[in-house]
Image (cartoon, coloured by chain):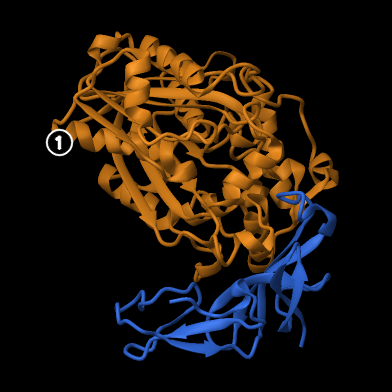
Chain colours: A blue, B orange
Amino acid sequence: MTVADWTTGEPQLVVLSCGGCGNVWYFQRPFCPRCGRLDPDEVASAGRGRVVATTVVHRAPSDEWRPLVPYTLVLVDLDEGVRVMAHAASGTAIGDTVGATFEERAGRLVPVFTPA
Amino acid sequence: MSYIAGSFATAFGRHEGQDTLGLMTQAATGALADAGLERADIDGIICGYSTTMPHLMLATVFAEHFGIRPRYAAALQLGGATGLAMAATAHFVIQSKAASRLLIVAGENRLSGQTRDSAIQALAQVGHPRYEVPLGTTVPAYYGLIASAYLDGRGAGEADLAELAVAMRSHAVDSPGAHYREPITVEDVLVSRAVAEPLKLLDCCPVSDGGAAMVVTGDQVNDHCLRVLGSGQAHQHQHVSVVPDLLSYGAGPSSRMALDEAGIGLDRIRYAAVYDSFTVTLALLLEEIGLAPPGQAGALARDGHFSPGGAVPLNTHGGLLSYGHCGVAGAMSHMAELQRQLTGRAGARQIPGQPDVALLHGDGGVMSSHTSMVVALP
């Protein structure tokens, strides 16, 4: 199972959903981590949600990220019921309603949330 | 029945030319001497891991290097919770009679043995390899996210978190082995350079070289043993993205399990050894355990509650924030200090009235793995 999402270069966030117990989750795996049922449904997220945590990274982990500091990382609760980590526009704050865009950063496609 | 019979932490800081096995050897030698035991007395060994010496079998590599032939060996990996989890495992091993006198040892040249980028990248791998790490994350960034939720959810300010860094530094002033010993103020913390906002440099523990070890036995082998009264653990998640509640991570159930096994209440605790990789780590753990009311950890620190003369002295050697952090051995320095405090051997740092019951708590990953222990004078 390889979900086509931003980690494979597709500009979308994908939520996995269990047809058996109704569980939804984000980190892809070919079974429901609650009930074990195989073959979860892939749901393309509308990319809308609410910010629950923010940080502004000043100390980058590597040369590829160093030119981009400071950059904002967030945890966002998507309307589909899962929490995702992503980049965000500078100044994004907890409680903001945001929408996902996708940008090339440090040589890869990443989700970037901006005010909705 | 099991006892912390001996413990030892090397000085933490920059130890150019030292390697993992050398630092582990120094620590093991110190802990054996503290316990009053010889290599031949040891029949079990538990090790952690080292980022500068990744190996499939660190426990037996060290056993051979140091010169012991145990009948029980294990290596354990729970990030920052590893040291206390090793002590808990020794407690279980002794109860099972698989071994009776165990050496627990860790050491790492985490500072001088690699570039800072290498250390930061290695540690960032506690994040999700596909959905977090590719975003340019670091461990301070994971904790920066947590800190923002803490400040927002508890109505605390950055100056409150800074109080915890100030307290740990004030303890380190009298701690000769500490990585950083110059006193600091709240203002110093607030104006230190941003690392992962809201966390500044002085909200973060340093990366250090060092080692620490302890000896856990089924019998009282000397007059300064501490009895293990109970232990507990909780492992509710690995990655910060899936934490359901950003104010509750597992320290509550873990510490309650340890206190329940000990058969005592939190009000009986006279000393606390709590994991403090970042100021926010310490605030969240103290509050979830119940050693501070929600949002009040910093205010209590400012009032001297956690000072050597306070109600619940905390990390009196300086903690990870000032004694330093060299990986698995980092939080084991908390045990070495605690044993000295409870047995009246802490010298210039000795707490008046010598505490008799202590709670330890370790956290690994991103508030992911929790281990607690209650120890007391026999």
Q: Which quarter of the image is occupied by the C terminus of chain B?
A: top left
Q: Position of residue B78 (x, y in %)?
A: 42, 45
In which image quadrant can residue A97 be found?
bottom right
Task: Return the residue nearer the eye: B229 or A105.
Answer: A105
In which image quadrant can residue B250 be found?
bottom left
State the residue at coordinates (59%, 19%). B11
Q: Is residue B351 visible?
A: no
Q: Position of residue B10 (x, y in %)?
A: 53, 18
Q: Is residue B264 above or below residue A113?
A: above
Q: Is residue B378 above or below residue B277?
A: above
Disc 1 on helix, strand or loop?
A: helix
Q: Is residue B288 above or below residue B43?
A: below
Task: Return the residue nearer the eye: B120 or B373.
Answer: B120
State the residue at coordinates (50%, 49%). B291
State the residue at coordinates (30%, 77%). A36
At label 1, counting other C-alpha atoms closer than 10 Å, the crowd grade (few under 14, some 14-19, many 20 or more) is few
Chain letter of the residue carrying label 1: B
Task: Specify whether B359 is left or right of B153.
Answer: left
Q: Amino acid at mark 1?
A: Ser
> Label 1, on which residue?
B96
Q: Position of residue B160 (x, y in %)?
A: 71, 51
Task: Specify whether B100 is left or right of B122.
Answer: left
Q: Position of residue A25 (x, y in %)?
A: 47, 78
In which image quadrant can residue B184 be found?
top right
State the residue at coordinates (56%, 76%). A83
In this rendering, the count of numbered labels is 1
Q: Which quarter of the image is occupied by the N terminus of chain B?
A: top left
